[in-house]
Amino acid sequence: MALPLARPTRRPPSAKSRRPSARPSARPPARRPARSPSASRLRRSQRRTAALLITPFFVLFAVVMAAPIGYAVWMSLFQERSSGLGFGGTEQVFAGFGNYTKALADAGFRASFAHIALYCALYIPVMIGGSLALALLVDSALARAKRFFQLALFLPHAIPGLIASIIWIYLYTPGLSPVLEWIGAFGGSWDFYRNDHVLASLVNLSAWQWMGYNMVIFYAALQAVPREVIEAAVVDGAGALRTALQIKVPMIASAIVMTVLFTCVGAIQIFTEPKLLNQRGAPSIDTEWSPTLFIWKAGFVRHDYGLAAAASLMLAALGVVLSYLVTRLGNRWKAATS
Amino acid sequence: MSTLTHDTAPATQPSASPRPATTAPRRTTPNALLSKGAVNGLLIIAAGYTLLPVTWLLFAATKNHRDLFATSGFAFGDFNLLANLRHVLTFNDGIYLRWFGNSVLYSVVGSAASTLICVATGYAFDKYDFHGKEKLFGLVLGGVLVPTTVIQLPMYLLATKAGIVNTYWALLLPALVNPFGVYLARVFSEGYVPNEVLEAARVDGAGELRTFARVSLPMLAPGFMTIFLFSFTASWNNFFGALVMLNDEQLYPVNLGLFMWNSVTQQQPEFYSLVITGSLVAVVPLVVAFVCLQRFWRSGLTAGAVK
């Protein structure tokens, strides 16, 4: 994912590195006069080694990624029709784009995209803003105990997503939760599962898991910002806040764009958290709340594989479109700031 | 304290500006103190937020079922940790241990194999020229973009046809393919294995494969560790895949087992302490591993993030 951004800068070293490996053939007589015809043999053995080294990956890639995608495309074109009165079993019939229109016509499917759009609108600013702010704080000359803070903030990422969700769901549960206890002690009350609160509960859960991870990425990028640039800004009279927002943030643009990209692609696949909230009986999180929940239900509860495949492919397409948009906008931003 | 402020004032307002020297110290000293307090205060709040749920888990795991609801979240009840642990480890003929072993198998064995494959592939992409190289690499990058949950259903159906649903292979096989690992391996190979070393090995007459195994692989060890950690986390976290592929309780990873226990807590509240203590047992080794191996995940994040 990071890749489209990282590639242009990475290319020169690889181009450079290619040259030395070709060099032996350019000056063989000096070193190994006995093996003058070895250049082509060397190249042949190199090609053979390369093939040997990459074959396992691409064989598995074909089996585990390409084949399922191809199969999903094929599956999405067929529907199961029950023959007769439904007693004669079902048969596969070619449906063209039938499954796609069926999915798009499904109110639950459309609603699931509306849900994640709303979720992203809240989650992405909170998450990116939060982790950026934390990275700038840790990067600031005033911060103490930087190692401790980095570790403490990264800790949630070491906790598996399912367990993190379970812990937070318990922290949302009346009777079990110290958080609700504290709120109660101050005379307040809060229902984490109520319709107009549940999105915030969900965002909190995801942000808790990923903020520290992204903070470490941003912090690493900030460390790479040349100190002279910052010193120059300070000499020019920029305060710490201005330096942070106008000098440091634009200079780590590519890390920010990459993180937004990762966050978007992750967010559209959200499954575990809403599934657990649904299990807890949060009233507005239904069994088709997110597209992946919809797909799961279509495939494994309703056994409508064609519909599930079509929905999966549309979700994948959304991911590709989002990646394209984020990279485009990111490139424009980088061009504007540099 | 005064020495501290004297130290920081010139650091933030470098001495390069001689003109406001008379006024600057007076104005920045309280300011610097204030902002130092603000910066560290905010960080403490943030760290409190990230540490709170884990701390609560620690407290909760020490309580018996009654205290779990009767006592305050951050207070001790009767110290019941050992009894809880015994309960988790022996419940249902020790199924938790079996789940834990399964998780280790899926994550450690799967990731080690997958990382070796990634490193070999990334190394070949970096060090060798071959036909259609950049196109193949483009395919790898495309693979990074494919959301895994999206191909889970067709993968399940193919696995059904192949007869591997409800076997260890159902989770191990998909875990072997890690396109992002290949990308990282290529970056690491560029950084860690100088081409001159390969040249020297060739001059000494070492075969290419032997050079890879004996010379390059050891040099790639930190990169190997980094990719291993990434893929380990991914498989340890893989809940959706396990939910789809496995029906047999005996094959569950910890994740899925805890999910199943958690799903009955509302009918049978005594499962709460099983889930809580089970979560703690699953989390502690991971946290320890992350703290010990921090330089690896940091280098992986950096390799992915900073050009």
Image (cartoon, coloured by chain):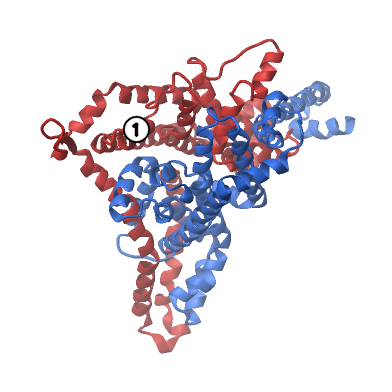
Chain colours: A red, B blue
What residue is at 28 percent from the left and 52 percent from the top?
B161
Residue in the foreground of this view, choosing between B95 and A38: B95
| Residue at position x 38%, y 67% in the image | A50
Residue at the outermost left position: A84
Residue B193 vertical position relative to residue B243 in the rendered view, above or below: below
Residue A225, image x and y in percent?
Answer: 60, 41
| Residue nearest the observer in this picture, B229 or B183 | B229
Q: Nearer the viewer, residue B142 or A71?
A: A71
Q: Is residue A229 visible?
A: no
Of the residues shown, which amino acid type is indicated by label 1? Lys
Tell me which chain the residue with mark 1 is part of. Answer: A
Q: Give the residue pinned by disc 1.
A: A297
Outermost residue, bottom direction? A34
Residue that sits furthest to the front in the current view: B93
The residue that appears at 39% across and 51% down in the rendered structure is: B166
Indicate left or right for B142 with B52 as reference.
left
When the figure is inspected, residue B25 is found, relative to residue B193, above or below; the finding is above
What secondary structure is found at the residue carrying circle 1?
helix
Q: Residues within 10 Å of mark 1 (few under 14, many from 20)?
A: some
In the displayed structure image, the side of residue B38 where residue B227 appears, left or right: left
Check the image and name the residue furthest to the right: B2
Q: Is residue B39 visible?
A: yes
> Residue A152 sits in which quadrant?
top right
Q: Is residue A296 or residue A8 the one in the foreground?
A: A296
